[in-house]
Amino acid sequence: DGGITQSPKYLFRKEGQNVTLSCEQNLNHDAMYWYRQDPGQGLRLIYYSQIVNDFQKGDIAEGYSVSREKKESFPLTVTSAQKNPTAFYLCASSNRGLNTEAFFGQGTRLTVV
Amino acid sequence: GDSVTQMEGPVTLSEEAFLTINCTYTATGYPSLFWYVQYPGEGLQLLLKATKADDKGSNKGFEATYRKETTSFHLEKGSVQVSDSAVYFCALSGSSSYGKLTFGQGTILTVHP
């Protein structure tokens, strides 16, 4: 089945550590996105990529980094510089044209302990 | 910049009641509009969409009409079920944003038997 796979579903991190969240898609989509979800705040865009080897900062990129070496993969690293990393992280992908909807993974819940 | 405003929640209804969740937006040009649904602990699923003025999106008994004159995209359902309990997000994709979504803050819906 085509879709987006995020792993792990739950992740615990100690303060001061970097951690990488995985996102893989087999929908043949050009564009991929990372969103952060906090209670009562909707989803906020962290980074997005419209093509391999290219990506742009979203609204809340500070403390995060990404790479896009393959069309299918868009990993997100939460660095120690991110002041409040505990959140639910959602990866999405879409075609690049106008009027196109995004498809979402099941999410990764990151908790800093 | 683009923005989406949803009615304040949470919303609590009895089974078979009528549902309206208000959504208004601010965007330049002609955005596409979406409603996504999120069940507990999961990612987002597309519920319906509309890509031009006066379009009506519909799915699973839910409907929303793209009203450019009032910049609105209100979600309605004539008779809700317990299984409709979830968080509902209104979102837009701007005419130049190629799939990048701007979300409202989400509305929690709880339906009691």
Image (cartoon, coloured by chain):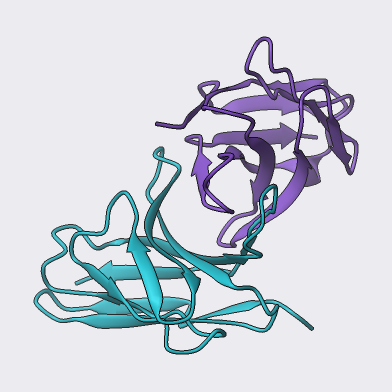
Question: Residue A15 sits in which quadrant?
Answer: bottom left
* B26 and A106: which is toward the camera: B26
Residue drawn 48% across and 77% down? Answer: A9
Residue at the top extreme, as displayed:
B69
Residue at the bottom extreme, as displayed:
A70
Instruction: Give coordinates of residue B9: x percent, y percent.
Output: 53, 26
Residue A57 appears left or right of B59: left
Q: Is residue B113 above or below residue B98?
A: above
Residue drawn 70% across and 23% down? Answer: B74
Question: Residue B60 sits in which quadrant?
Answer: top right
Q: Quadrant of the C terminus of chain B?
A: top right
Q: Is residue B112 above or below residue B47?
A: above
* A13 and B111: which is toward the camera: A13
Residue B78 appears left or right of B10: right
Q: Is residue B66 above or below residue A41?
A: above
Instruction: Give coordinates of residue B25: x percent, y percent.
Output: 55, 24
Instruction: Give coordinates of residue B35: x percent, y percent.
Output: 68, 40
Q: Quadrant of the N terminus of chain B?
A: top left
Number of numbered discs: 0
Chain A shade: cyan
**Chain drawn purple in the picture:** B
Residue A89 appears left or right of A98: left
Instruction: Give coordinates of residue B28: x percent, y percent.
Output: 52, 27
Residue drawn 62% across and 35% down? Answer: B31
